[in-house]
Image (spheres, rainbow, N blue to C red):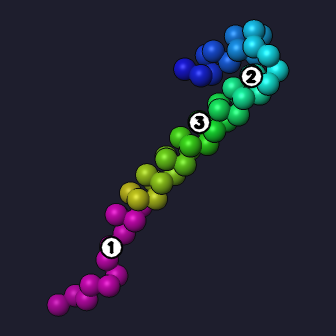
Amino acid sequence: MMAVFTPYVLRTESTWQAVAWLVMLAGTVVFIAALIRAERLIRHLDRQPDSDVSSP
């Protein structure tokens, strides 16, 4: 949603508001990427067999 409004914000808002908008946009992208990375890491750890458990 933010990416859709970015051209409008850059045209109509002041320089500082446009910079703040771009910082928020970048932060949102980084946050989403971190969530995806964490989810992939958790799934990877769940699929690994337990090496601590000895076989009978």
Return the residue at label 2.
17
**Residue 30, position as x, y percentages in the image:** 61, 42
Crowd tier of the residue under label 3, counting other residues whose Cα lies within 10 Å: few below 14, some 14–19, many 20 or above: few
Residue type at the position of mark 2 = Gln
Crowd tier of the residue under label 1, counting other residues whose Cα lies within 10 Å: few below 14, some 14–19, many 20 or above: few
Return the residue at label 1.
49
Q: Which residues are magenta?
A: 44-56
Residue type at the position of mark 3 = Thr
Return the residue at label 3.
28
Quote the CA–CA distance across marks 1 and 3.
34 Å
| Residue at point 32%, 85% (across, down) | 52
Disc assigned to residue 24: none
Q: Nearer the viewer, mark 1 or mark 3?
A: 3
Lower sequence index among marks 2 and 3: 2
Residue 15: name its quadrant: top right
| Residue at point 59%, 22% (across, down) | 2
Q: Identify whether 51 is placed above or below 29.
A: below
